[in-house]
Amino acid sequence: MASDNSGISSCIASSWWQPVLFAGLAGGMGWGIRGQYGHETGAMIAGLLVSLTLVFLMAPPTIKSLSAARAAALATAAIGIGGTMTYGQTIGLTQNANFIGHWEAWRWGMIGLSIKGGIWISFAGAFLGIGLGCEIPLSRDAAPDGGAPGGLHGRDFPAELSL
């Protein structure tokens, strides 16, 4: 039984290698610029370049410009949050002259950098996904059947929670 993925692939505006290549190039350039600013501000520069690249290449063609800007802004803020993490000592384990040739320290430093980098990029991916996620109608008029978002009606909730 073959599955049909045509609905999923039609939402993505480019093939798989373009976002990988261009986001990597944008991130590399942004990381070079980051060195001049440091910490949260510098991380947000790299985050903005990467998130704009990903939104441009991966968002569906029907996306509204406000939704695209929101997704890029949320991902940029998440990368900036990651810029608050301290990782100087962890990098020191991989590059300190006293530890050169000490493979256990190097491995420990690389594991630490992988964990911290994974946490960092997880925030960015989650916030980018939130920004690109479906929009929830905010008024009763925009919701299906005049009810609450998602087709839920006021009778399904206690009176103080209904719209």
Image (cartoon, helix red, strand yellow):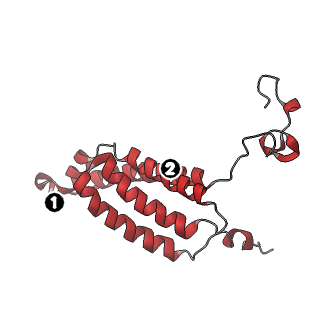
Q: How far, Cα to Cα, is label 2 from label 1?
A: 41 Å
Residue 20, given in percent of the width and then of the height, sits at: 47, 71
Number of dots carrying numbers: 2
Residue 2 figure quarter: bottom right
Q: Is residue 126 above or below residue 101?
A: above
Residue 150, given in percent of the width and then of the height, sits at: 79, 45
Q: Nearer the viewer, residue 62 or 86?
A: 62
Q: Where, quadrant-wise, is the N terminus in this rendering?
A: bottom right
Residue 96, given in percent of the width and then of the height, sits at: 15, 53
Which residue appears at 55% of the width and 74% of the height? 16
Q: Amino acid at mark 2?
A: Leu
| Element on which disc 1 rests | loop
Tell me the tag on residue 101: 1
Residue 103 appears anywhere in the view: yes
Residue 104 appears anywhere in the view: no
Which residue appears at 58% of the width and 75% of the height? 14
Q: Is residue 22 above or below residue 76?
A: below
Q: Amino acid at mark 1?
A: Gly
Q: Where, quadrant-wise, is the C terminus in this rendering?
A: top right
Q: Which residue is mark 2?
A: 74
Q: Is residue 1 above or below residue 31?
A: below
Which residue appears at 73% of the width and 74% of the height? 6
